Amino acid sequence: MKGHLFLLLTDEKNILLVRRALETLNTGDLSGVSEFISPHYFNHESKMDPTRSKMRGPEEFMDTVKNIRKAVTDLHYEEEETLASNNKVISIVKVTGKHTGSFFDFIPPTGNEICYKAVHVHTIGGDGKIVEHRAVRDDLALMYQMGVVMASSPQYGDFLNAWKGTK
């Protein structure tokens, strides 16, 4: 019984760590990042960028927060469901905001509202901090809402907007 109680307490503690990361994304307050992000932190979502792929630890997380918040005003990560087991925390979130700035210096601002869902998988390291992050996002919705992708012909425009638009 003691082992199960320890795992429950550990799971709750790990969920609180991830919630701190989400709250940092929501507020932009970077002051306590090193309290929950490990020096060995690796964000798999940064792999495609030659500069950001080399970043680790709190520096990478803070860079992500700054870039996302620079691109999206009124940014909000709404936790819909979170599960934890051992050293993994999996969260389903809804992300909303307005695309008013350059997205990672790649996608120019559109002024469009964004709203998409994502699954975030965080790994908690031996130091009790977040050491790894992966995400599975609805990138089609995000890229459609930012104007990067469009229907291949007008006949699909209404369908795509209904399926992946913000309404």
Image: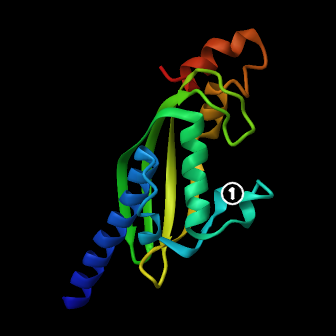
Nearer to me, 74 or 42: 74
Residue found farthest to the front: 31
- Residue 35, given in percent of the width and then of the height, sits at 41, 71
Question: Residue at point 77% right, 58% down?
Answer: 51
SS at mark 1?
A: helix
Going by the numbered disc 1, the residue's amino acid type is Ser
- Residue 43, given in percent of the width and then of the height, sits at 62, 63
- Residue 6, given in percent of the width and then of the height, sits at 26, 84
Question: Residue at point 78% right, 19% down?
Answer: 152
Does residue 155 appear to the left or right of 122 in the view shown?
Answer: right
Question: Residue at point 56% right, 63% down?
Answer: 133
The residue that label 1 is drawn on is: 46
Rendered-image quadrant of the N terminus? bottom left
Question: How many neighbours does mark 1 have within 10 angstroms: few (below 14), some (14-19), or many (20 or more)?
Answer: some
Whether residue 58 is visible to the viewer of this picture, yes or no, is: yes
Nearer to me, 53 or 151: 53
Depicted 107 relative to depicted 46: above or below? above
Tell me the quarter of the picture where residue 36 sits: bottom left
Question: Residue at point 45% right, 74% down?
Answer: 129
